[in-house]
Amino acid sequence: MSDTATNLDHLDAQQLRELVQSLMGRVEAGELEIDRRDREIAFKQATIDKLTHEMAVLKRLKFASKSESFSTEQRNLLEDTLDADLAAMELELEQLTPAKAAPQGKQQPKRQALPSHLPRREIHHEPRNVACVCGCVLKRIGEDVAEKLDYQPGVFTVERHVRGKWVCARCETLIQAPVAPHIIDKGIPTAGLLAQVLVAKYLDHLPLYRQEAIFGRAGLAIPRSTLAAWVGQCGVHLQPLVDALRSEMLRSQVLHADETPVAMLKPGHGKTHRAYLWSYCTTAYDALSAVVFDFADSRGGQHARAFLGLGGESGWRGTLVCDDFSGYKACFELGVTEAGCLAHARRKFHELWANHGSPIGEQALKFFGELYEVERVVAELEPEDRRRVRQERSRKVADALHQWLTAQRQKVPEGSATAKAIDYSLKRWLALTRYIDDADLPADNNRVENQIRPIALGRQNWLFAGSLRAGQRAAAVMSLVHSARLNGHEPHAYLKDVLERLPTHPASRIAELLPHRWLPTSAF
């Protein structure tokens, strides 16, 4: 204290003021850092409390579900969903809370040994250098063995990870080669088995209780609760990839959008209500091939606006190809440009012709046929050539169609099916024909409808989504496997490689694992 006072005695007034200002700046910076940490702790605690509450609700539902009036298949799907949701929440809680050392003396549950009849493949992990720091050569004195369950269609195998123990005879230094971390480090599944479960559930539409039976026939019955826990944990680990995929897709200036209904369970009521799977994808003319699904509990337009980030200055401002659903209308008021779907307009006239033999429907189909003939011609052309051909050929056909529709509309009675078909096209004419002057626009929304079609077919196997969280997890995994397929990758090979690399892959380079950029490990 006396030294500090002596040092201060040598300072003049200006230096003292500077010193005081410096100290005040440090105090202020310290207070800001404390405030930031307090906010971070409060946010984490709120998230922990929310997850803890949700877990308590799900656990209660898990036991209460047995008394609800569900069929056997519905109850199986509900139990799978609850187990997957619980596993996902436990992993999220684990990531939010600091690691705690296991209490001394507490025994870890002993895992049941994998069946001895399954084929085994040994993977050895040995140190590259067996020279000790003291100069001696290490001697191998034993090994640790960890077994992981692998799966190829129809066949289980066991990976035996053998870690040799090497010791120095002089200084007794013991070393072992590390084993690369796994997505589920303390579990038995390899990335190959996890990929199989995910692809079967979300691409082949096989619920977990059916997979349990299939695995049983292949030689090992894995409980559905275990499969569900794997699915929930994988969903948490894969979500950053889907977030990155969405961010990259929103850089495109043209997107397709569509939505399809999916039943979602209302636990506690024994009933389901209508939820929606929203789909967004790039066009066939875009260098990026991607599709991202977004699960929501309603068909409200706010879900589309939230996905596109509308409402702020940084929101998406491209052209959206969609049908006439009112939920998209608010997007167009916020700076998004509307492009219509020629196929939707054509479909209404096809129904007139197919169901009633309508001459107006038949003639309209001929006009649409000419427009689509031009699209077949320009499909592989460069953008400027595509625009030129469309303006030369499609514009003439479109103008003639518009003139003819306007004339026919004067001849048909209000409220008739023919009047409704004509009004659909006339009221959306600008949006329907916008593609003629923009080479980057497709003529219709068929591309995204084709992405939804497998989902719609799978609903018979789903019966319903067990929860909002389960629907969002399904949307995330389906985004990755369908985007992989769009880019020419085999979905199982893609997911297996990604799940193997994720535990050690830097978060700052997550984009390298996206389907349109992915290169298998063997390519390096």
Image: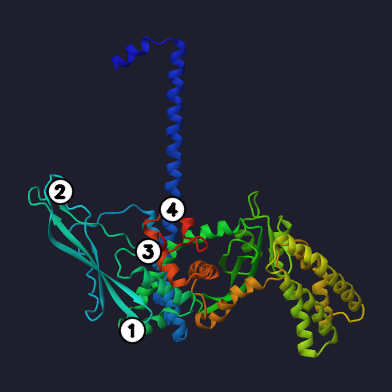
Query: Distance of mark 1 from mark 4, alpha carbons?
Result: 37 Å
SS for tag 3? helix
Labels 2 and 4: the sequence-earlier one: 2
SS for tag 2? loop
Where does label 4 land, which residue? 507
SS for tag 1? helix
Where does label 1 land, which residue? 218
- The image shows residue 373 at horizontal and vertical percentages of 75, 75
Q: Is residue 364 left or right of residue 119?
A: right
Where does label 2 land, which residue? 132
Which amino acid, mark 1? Ala
SS for tag 4? helix
Front position among marks 4 and 3: 3
What residue appears at the point 76 percent right and 78 percent down from the top-left corner?
346
Q: Is residue 302 visible?
A: yes
Where does label 3 land, which residue? 500
Which amino acid, mark 3? Glu
Number of numbered callouts drawn: 4
